[in-house]
Structures are given as C-alpha cells and as structure tokens.
C-alpha cells in the first residue's frame, strides 16, 4: 500500500487539476438545457476510468447515462461497489456567488464551485484511489465497480433500470457511498442513517384565466387563498405534521439511539449563525439533532401563483401551486405517506377550486448496522487516512437510489463522510477544502486494501 500512497503524493497537483476540469462541466440534471453538459461529465469519468485500466460502459436508460466502470480480475478477492453522482444542483441564484459556479476558484486552500463537495470531489477521489493502486502497486487488491450516475439531484430512477439490467454482474460484498459530510474539518464520519423521501406537486385551479379582481372579486374562490388555507392545515402550530396516518410506522427513538444522536455537542449560537434563522422551531420533545436526522418532516419547497412582477396587478389568478417533500424515517412507507398526504389534501381543499396532485417516486429511510464487517473496514480506512476515528452519524438528507441497491442487490450502503460539514451543498459558494479531496483519496486507498 505504501507505493499507492506514494503515487498519490507524486500526483497531487495533477489530481487536483483533473478535479478542477471536472468541475468546469455544468452538469445540472434538473435543467434540460444542461443535459449535453451532463453527458460530457459522464464521458469525462468513463474515459478517465478506461484510461487507468477499467472496463467501462455508459448505461443509456430513460434519462441521463449511468457510468459503469469495473475492474474484476480476481475471482477470489472481495468485490466492492462504489456509488457516486456526477450531476449537480442548479447554481442559482448566480448573483450570490463570489466566483462563478463553474469556474472553480481556490481561496485559502478551499475550492469553490458547484458540485465540488456534492459529489464530484468525493466520488472522483474514490476513482483516483483505484488509480493509486493500479499505477503505484500494479494491481488492485479487490474487484471494484464504480456506478456514477447523473440523476441523483433530480430524483430520476435510471439507476433502478441499470441495476435490474445488470444485477448478475453486480454481485458484491459491500456498497460504499462517499456523498455525505464529515463532522468537522479533518474529522471524518461514518454515517449509519439517512432519511427517506416522499414528494408531491399540488395545484389548485379556479377560473379559466386570470380575472379582473374588481369585476369578479368576491364572487369566485381565489386559488391562491384556497392554497394558502390548504397549506395551513398541514401542520399544527408547534410544527408537528397534522396529517392522519403520517406518523404510522415511525420507530420511536430508544434511549441508546437518542444518546448516540446527541453525543456530538449542539451549539445553538453556531446553529443560528450557520442557518441565518432567527430561532429554532420544531416538534416539542426532541432535540435539534434529533429533529434534523431522526424525525419525519413535511416541507413546502416552493409556493407560487398569480402576478409576481413589479407593481400591482389587480387579478384573481387562474391557479396556484406548491411543491411538497417529506423526509421519512424508519419504518415509514413512502407510498403510504404519499397516500396519506393526498387524502388529507383532498379532504381539506376549500370549495370553489379544483385540486390536482402529482405524486413522485419516494424512497425509504436508510438505517444500517455500523458494527458489521465492511462498515468496520471503512471505519479503519477513515481512521488510517485522517489520523482520527470516524464519528458515527445519522444524517437528515436522502439518497433515494439506495433503496434500489437494497431491494435489487441486497446491499446496505456504507456511507463515508469526508467533506467538511460547512460545504454549502445546494447553496451558493459551495466549498470543498483541497485537503478533504486528498483525505478522500487516502481513504479509498486504505479501504481497497481491505484490512
Ligand atoms: N449528498 C446528498 C445527500 C446527503 C445530504 C447526505 C445531506 C447526507 C447529508 C445528495 O446529493 C442530495 O442532496 N440528495 C437530495 C435528494 C433529492 C434531490 C431527491 C436531498 O437529500 O435533498
Ligand atoms: Zn450528493
């Protein structure tokens, strides 16, 4: 392994330049105008993996391609799948970036670019760790498959198709995912839980067109008012979700789990600084750490309708709409939650409007046993790479596709958290310390050694 680590030291600058080139590709999956660029990012990773000795394919399902690169030459060695994503969140609002999102800049040892932490840096690091073995030691000590997809950030399900089509080629001992955060700079995490997801889009339709509010106002229902009333029924004033059946299946936290979640000290002033919120708010009886990772939520992600331009416009809008996502915890069933939300919306919709609800694919929460063999190997790899044992964390975000790995391949994800927690993923000025990148590569090198 020493020569693999030496190879990393000799190639630090080239690896960094490679990451910067990758970050220059605006692979925003949610925006169709960027799909040609997303395909370029897929090809970037595919051809790099091919160049270091992997067999590769681009799986073209119904959507953006999934990159599959594999090196499986030793039937007696264990097989590890590594999952990551090459797509990134939209960079908007652009005016809040200190340097343009797709022109990576390094300031004080920190890279600023959309996707640097989530997830181009951490996933590329896992590929480069394979290169360190192949070029530094002339061989990989295990069989390795990379599955790097392009629809993680937009809820696509092309990976389902890929896993179904190739399930026999993908029999493996472990699934490793490097797409979650560390607990502090230089302090890695082994994440044993993520929340699941349920999502619906809701629209409320009134008159056939925007109406003059003087001619007609008072005699027809206003869709924006109706939607506001409807949205207001979704929560109790204290923040608990007020939908019948929403909490069905929610596993209550036992004392040991609560202790584990609250092990990391919570600093309220720091939390308020980080979020910019004037205060915390949430269900009574739970700490902020519990609320953020282990309790289910229902959020309005956007609400719109009617005139949005400057000045006044006296109309009754023809429609209004909102987008809703719920974060789920074990053992909530995403379909049952979607059905409960739908029933509630139908039952509470005010008169005088027509309601339309469009459900999306959901995903179950992830909760794994970090004491199993491979998670412990990952923990040792993190410790060797950072000089600090990882902290066991439970995170509030979601990686919906992990449900497919569980259902189709029977694999529980091992989530290694290597990027600093103030990475501003999904926000302007997303950041990724250069040292996190090298630590990520070192983690891969140790992990592939399998000890
Ligand atoms: N990297 C995140 C997942 C994540 C977030 C892990 C926070 C740990 C902590 C991932 O890329 C992501 O943002 N997922 C989306 C999924 C959604 C678009 C369906 C999310 O959680 O919002
Ligand atoms: Zn991600």
Image: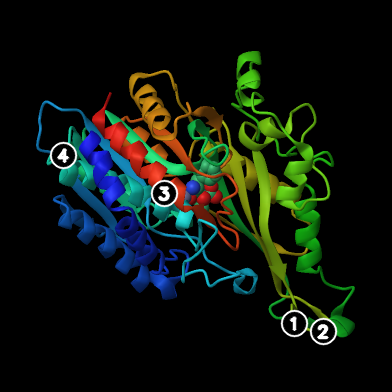
C-alpha separation, residue under disc 3 versus residue under disc 4? 21 Å
Does residue 306 appear left or right of residue 147 in this picture? right
Q: Nearer the viewer, residue 170 or 110?
A: 110
Q: Is mark 2 within 8 Å of ligand 1?
A: no
Cβ atoms at labels 2 and 1 below 8 Å apart: yes
- Can you see residue 43? yes
Residue 235: percent from left, percent from top = 77, 43
Q: Nearer the viewer, residue 392 or 355?
A: 392
Quarter where residue 223 is shown:
bottom right
Q: Mark 2 or mark 4: name the one nearer the start of the chain.
A: 4
CA separation in Å, label 4 and label 1 = 62 Å
Rounded to the nearest angstrom, the CA distance separating label 2 from label 4 is 70 Å
Residue at numbered disc 2: 313
Residue found at x 80% / y 69% = 222
Q: Earlier in the sequence, mark 3 or mark 4?
A: 4
| Residue identified by numbered label 1 | 309
Q: Residues within 10 Å of mark 1 (few under 14, many from 20)?
A: few
Q: Secondary structure at mark 2?
A: loop
Mark 3 lies on residue: 437
Residue at (84, 83) in percent of width and height: 314
* Image position of 441 (left or right of 217): left
In the picture of the structure, the residue carrying the numbered disc 4 is: 137
Q: Residue at x 87, y 77 (%)?
A: 217
Against 98, is 262 above or below? above
State the CA–CA distance, disc 2 to disc 3: 51 Å
Q: From the viewer's perspective, tell me whether residue 115 is left or right of residue 397.
A: left
């Amino acid at each position: 392994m020493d020569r693999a680590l030496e190879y990393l030291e000799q190639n630090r600058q080239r690896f960094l330049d490679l990451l910067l080139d990758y970050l220059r590709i605006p692979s925003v999956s949610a925006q169709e105008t960027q799909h040609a660029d997303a395909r370029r990012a897929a090809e970037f990773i595919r051809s790099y993996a091919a160049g270091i000795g992997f067999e590769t394919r681009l799986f073209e399902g119904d959507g953006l391609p999934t990159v599959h690169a594999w090196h499986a030459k030793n039937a007696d060695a264990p097989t590890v799948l590594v999952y990551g994503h090459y797509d990134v969140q939209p960079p908007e609002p652009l005016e809040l970036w200190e340097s343009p999102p797709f022109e990576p800049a390094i300031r004080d040892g920190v890279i600023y670019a959309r996707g640097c932490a989530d997830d181009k840096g951490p996933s590329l690091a896992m590929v480069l760790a394979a290169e360190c073995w192949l070029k530094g030691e002339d061989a990989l000590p295990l069989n390795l498959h990379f599955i790097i997809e392009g629809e993680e950030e937009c809820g696509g399900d092309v990976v389902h198709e890929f896993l179904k089509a190739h399930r026999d080629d993908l029999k493996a001992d472990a699934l490793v995912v490097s797409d979650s955060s560390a607990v502090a700079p230089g302090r890695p995490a082994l994440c044993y839980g993520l929340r699941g997801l349920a999502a619906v889009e809701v629209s409320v339709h009134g008159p056939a067109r925007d109406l003059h509010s003087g001619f007609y106002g008072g005699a027809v229902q206003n869709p924006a008012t109706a939607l506001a009333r409807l949205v207001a029924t979704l929560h109790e004033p204290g923040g608990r979700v007020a939908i019948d059946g929403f909490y069905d299946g929610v596993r209550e936290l036992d004392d040991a789990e609560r202790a584990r979640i609250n092990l990391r000290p919570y600093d309220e002033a720091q939390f308020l600084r980080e979020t910019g919120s004037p205060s915390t708010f949430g269900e009574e009886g739970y700490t902020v750490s519990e609320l953020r990772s282990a309790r289910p939520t229902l959020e309005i992600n956007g609400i719109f309708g009617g005139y949005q331009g400057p000045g006044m416009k006296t109309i009754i809008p023809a429609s209004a709409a909102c987008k809703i996502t719920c974060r789920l915890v074990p053992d909530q069933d995403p379909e049952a939650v979607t059905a409960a939300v739908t029933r509630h919306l139908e039952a509470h919709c005010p008169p005088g409007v027509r309601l339309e609800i469009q459900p999306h694919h959901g995903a179950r929460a992830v909760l794994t046993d970090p004491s199993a063999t491979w998670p412990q190997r990952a923990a040792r790899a993190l410790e060797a790479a950072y000089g600090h044992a990882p902290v066991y964390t439970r995170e509030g975000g979601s990686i919906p596709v992990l449900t497919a790995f569980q259902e189709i391949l029977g694999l529980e994800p091992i989530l290694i958290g290597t990027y600093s927690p103030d990475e501003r993923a999904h926000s302007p000025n997303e950041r990724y310390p250069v040292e996190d990148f090298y630590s990520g590569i070192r983690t891969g090198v140790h992990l592939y050694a399998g000890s």
